[in-house]
Amino acid sequence: MNGFDCALYWTCDVMKNPANLAKHQANPKVAPVIAKMMAKFAGPK
């Protein structure tokens, strides 16, 4: 799987079942994207 296919796969997988986010956090290609999303949607501190 290339980078785009990987991103597309995990995004669709998580949209169908949000609990699958934990399954994809260990993927080195996905982890930085998840970290950015979490930081953006964390809200004001």
Image (cartoon, rainbow, N blue to C red):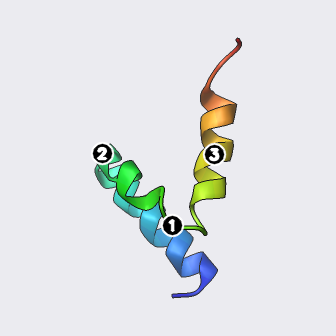
Compared with 10, 16 (above or below) is above
Disc nearer the start of the sequence (2/1)? 2
User: Up-down: is 5 above or below 40?
Assistant: below
Q: Secondary structure at mark 3?
A: helix
Which tag, 1 or 3, sits closer to the chain's start?
1
12 over 22 or under it: above or below: below
Helix, strand or loop for disc 1 = loop
Circle 1/circle 3 CB separation < 8 Å: no
Q: Residue at x 48, y 55 (%)?
A: 25
Q: Specify which label sits upstream in the sequence, 2 or 3.
A: 2
Label 2: few (<14), some or many (≥20) within 10 Å?
Answer: few
Residue 15 drawn at (x, y percent): 38, 51
Q: Amino acid at mark 1?
A: Asn
Question: Which residue is at the front of the view, 33 or 16?
Answer: 33
Q: CA distance from mark 2 to mark 3?
A: 16 Å
In this picture, residue 23 sits left or right of residue 2? left
- Mark carried by residue 35: 3
Name the amino acid type tagged 3. Ala
Q: Mark 2: which secondary structure?
A: helix
Question: Residue 44: image x %, image y %?
Answer: 71, 13
Residue bearing mark 2: 19
Within-10-Å neighbours for mark 1: few <14, some 14–19, many 20+:
few
Check whether the beta carbons of the residues at disc 2 and disc 1 lie within 8 A of each other. Answer: no
Q: Which residue is mark 1?
A: 27
Question: Quick one: quadrant of the C terminus?
Answer: top right
